[in-house]
Image (cartoon, rainbow, N blue to C red):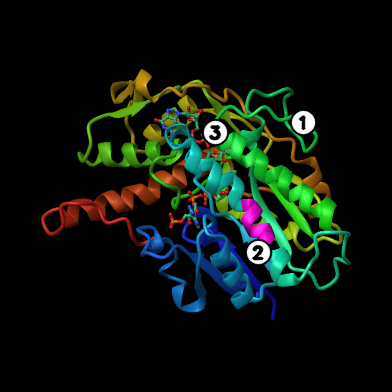
Amino acid sequence: MKRALITGVTGQDGSYLAEHLLRCGYEVWGLLRGQPSPHRSRISRIADDLKFVEGDLLDQSSLVAAVDRAQPDEVYNLAAISYVPMSWQQADLTGEVTGLGVLRMLEAIRMVSGIGRSGTTSMAGQIRFYQASSSEMFGKVREVPQNEDTALHPRSPYGVAKTYGHFITRNYRESFGLFAVSGILFNHESPRRGREFVTRKISRAAARISKGLQSELRLGNLDAVRDWGFAGDYVKAMHLMLQQGNPGDYVVGTGRTHSVRDAVRIAFETVGLDWSRHVVCDSRLVRPAEVDLLCADPKRARAQLGWEPTVDFDELVRMMVEADLERAEREQRDVARAPTEPEGDW
Ligand code: NAP
Ligand code: GDD
């Protein structure tokens, strides 16, 4: 039985990846930060099937101990400070976690595997490493669509930190012969998406406004364009990358673009409301440096991994609104008992 260690297992992607690897017959270990996370509800349904180990990307020795304990065949490094606006407020911390955290994870693998600092080693029997790189690294894009060779121009401290993680992963591959790959994933969403990200903010607001639980939705730049897909599809690409004969980096996205305004329109149509009566543009939510347009060229992932997205944008938005409608109904029922909305039941 193969063993996998997932950092960021309590996140959106970590929860889908853990489910996918369990279905593939893996023994799945999740790295948890010391104190109980408010997001553990994402994995509550599968918690009995997982093994847990404590650790933090800020703490080198905890990562060495975690890798040593889990003895994984594959490590998926999904942990990060992943919310772009927060990276301007806490740029130093973002650099430490999202950037240097990748180095610490690679060092933990190198130390536990006994791979020296000089010379390369055979890839046979090695721990394989997946790094969660991001389309945010393309930032002020140099070409449309973006592929694995497109030059990077990150526009946020988050994007800069991810760029460090991307290149240090490649560097450990080239320096030590590690089977280390980066998936350059474009935006992917689901009903498990954090509420701070724009699609979930929109689906949740549309659902709650339709149930009389909220009156308006404040947004920043409605013209931003993204290549949005379904997280459940994207974790399969992560797994496929580690099953290849040779390590390499892959762009993963749909190749189709939509604006934030499109997401708003579809979400409000789903609940039968006119979005223009409820959405307020708030200049405080506009970013200091925006990424205007991201669009993937996923040819390599299609050709070499055989990967294809299965959920289109309209379906994705509707899926998220439907899930938020159920939550809003529960919230209505529970309001007398518990004044705050329960986050659970993913
Ligand atoms: P997410 O929901 O924000 O999850 C982030 C995870 O990182 C959480 O499990 C969090 O744990 C953990 N974490 C944060 N700081 C940590 C630390 N110091 N030590 C250990 N764990 C820590 O993110 P996601 O959407 O699942 O994304 C997964 C990864 O893919 C991230 O690296 C993200 O940057 C990258 N990515 C995401 C997308 C996307 O569209 N979703 C696209 C490209 C790349 P707690 O629960 O304890 O806070
Ligand atoms: N979050 C948010 N909130 N975004 C808004 C809002 C708002 O009120 N109004 C407009 N937007 C615009 C943002 O300016 C951005 O252009 C776009 O919506 C998407 O924002 P997010 O959903 O926060 O995602 P992101 O693209 O910044 O980052 C996500 O995708 C990256 C991959 O490209 C995150 O998941 C990153 O971790 C990931 O790397």
Label 2 beta carbon less than 8 Å to ligand 1: no
Is residue 188 visible in the rendered image? The answer is no
Q: Are marks 2 and 1 in contact (CB under 8 Å)?
A: no
Q: CA distance from mark 3 to mark 2?
A: 25 Å
Q: Considering depth in this image, is 133 or 301 the residue closer to the camera?
A: 133
User: In the drawing, does residue 225 fall left or right of residue 338?
Assistant: right
Q: Which residues are magenta?
A: 102-107
Residue tagged by mark 2? 108
Q: Quadrant of residue 214?
A: top left
Residue tagged by mark 1? 150
User: In the drawing, does residue 234 fall left or right of residue 279?
Assistant: right
Q: Considering depth in this image, is 122 or 266 the residue closer to the camera?
A: 122
Residue type pointed to by label 1:
Thr
Residue tagged by mark 3? 157
Q: Considering depth in this image, is 179 or 2 the residue closer to the camera?
A: 179
**Within 10 Å of the Cα at label 1, are there few (<14), some (14-19), or many (20+) other Cα atoms?**
few
- Quadrant where the image shows the C terminus: bottom left
User: In the drawing, does residue 219 fall left or right of residue 238?
Assistant: left
Q: Nearer the viewer, mark 2 or mark 1?
A: 2
Report the number of discs: 3
Residue type pointed to by label 2:
Ala
Q: Earlier in the sequence, mark 3 or mark 2?
A: 2
Please name the predominant secondary structure of the magenta segment in the image. helix
**Within 10 Å of the Cα at label 3, are there few (<14), some (14-19), or many (20+) other Cα atoms?**
many
Residue type pointed to by label 3:
Pro
